Image: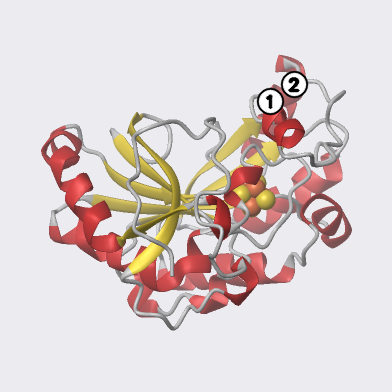
Amino acid sequence: MSQEGTIEAGSRYDLRVGKSPDAPDESQANDDSDGAFGYVHSYETSSRYDGPGLRAVLFVSGCLLRCTYCHNPDTWHLKDGTYISAQRVIERLGSFAPALRSLDGGLTISGGEVMVQLGFTRRILAGAKRMGLHTAIETSGFLGDRADDGYLSVVDLVLLDIKSSDPETYRKVTGRDLAPTLRFAQRLAALNKPVWVRFTLVPGSTDDPANVEGIARFVAPMKNVQWVEVQPFHQLGAFKWKAMNLEYKHLDTATPTAELTNRVIEQFRAAGCNAR
Ligand code: SF4
C-alpha cells in the first residue's frame, strides 16, 4: 500500500513520474471504490483559463487515451501520481476558497482523465460544492458512461474535449473510439448541463475542414454548449515525451498559424457556435 504523500503547488508542465510505484494500472482502477484516496499529478492555484473566474486546477492521474499530441503523458499512469487523501486535497482547497469565491471562480479538475478515479474526484467535487465553489471537470468523455447523475450533480460545468468528429481520425490521434464521447455530449445536452467544448487544433492531424465541420454541426444545436474553444497545438509538453522515452510523432508539427486558427474559429461560428 502506498504511503500518503504531499502535493505541492506546481504546473501542468512539471514532469512528475514514479511517485507511487505500487499503484494499480489505470485500466484496473476501481471506480466503485469510496474514493477516500487517489493519485494526483499537481495543482495550480491561479488559472484564468480553465473555467469562469479564477480557478484552482487539480490535475489527477490516470488516462485511457493516448493522444499523440498529449502535453501531459506523465498523467497517463496512476503510478506516476502522488497518493493522497481526498480530505487533504479538500483542506488545501479550503485555504484558497475565499479568493476563488471573491473572483467568481472555483475548482476545475483535469488530468489525465477525471473519470478514471470517479470516487476520488466525486468526493473532491462535493467538498468544493460544500465550500460554495463553482466546479468544473475537463474530460474526453470516453468514460462518460461511468458518471451517474449524482456525479454530474456536483459538476457545474463540463469542459468536454472533442478531439475529432471522424471516428478514424479519432482513433488515429487517441487510440480509442469516438462514440462514447458523442454519447456523453448528447447526455449532457439532454440534462442541459453547461458545457464548453474544447478542440485541439493540430496541423496535419485534426485540421481537415471536414473534420472541423463535423464537430461544428454536431455541437451547434446543443443549447447547453456555451463556448467552443479552439486550442492551438503547442510543443510545451514535448520534453516529457523525450524524458519518458516515448515515441513522439509531433517533433516537426508546427504551431497553427493565425490564419489556420481563424479559419477554424470561423467554421465553428458559421455553423452557429459561440467560438473563440
Ligand atoms: S485525453 Fe488528455 S491526458 Fe489523456 S492522452 Fe489525451 S490529451 Fe493526454
Crowding at mark 1 (Cα within 10 Å: few <14, some 14-19, many 20+): some
Q: Quadrant of the C terminus?
A: top right
- The spot of residue 171 in percent (x, y) is 83, 59
> What is the image's colouring?
secondary structure
Residue 22 marker? none
- The spot of residue 77 in percent (x, y) is 61, 57
The residue wearing badge 1 is: 234
In this rendering, position of residue 48 left or right of residue 73: left
| Up/down of 244 relative to 173, above or below | above
Is there any visible trace of residue 162 in the rendered image? Answer: no
- Judging depth in this view, the residue of 197 and 222 nearest the camera is 197
Q: Are marks 1 and 2 in contact (CB under 8 Å)?
A: yes
Marks counted in the figure total 2
- The spot of residue 81 in percent (x, y) is 50, 52
| Up/down of 230 relative to 171, above or below | above
Q: Amino acid at mark 2?
A: Thr
Q: Amino acid at mark 1?
A: His
Is there any visible trace of residue 72 in the rendered image? Answer: yes
Secondary element at image label 2: loop
Q: Residue at x 52, y 54 (%)?
A: 61
- The spot of residue 153 in percent (x, y) is 31, 70
Label 1 residue near ligand 1, CB within 8 Å: no
The residue wearing badge 2 is: 255
In this rendering, position of residue 138 left or right of residue 99: right
- Judging depth in this view, the residue of 190 and 179 nearest the camera is 179
Crowding at mark 2 (Cα within 10 Å: few <14, some 14-19, many 20+): some
Query: Image quadrant of residue 9?
Result: top left
Q: Residue at x 29, y 67 (%)?
A: 123
Of the two numbered discs 1 and 2 on the same chain, state the one appearing first in sequence.
Answer: 1
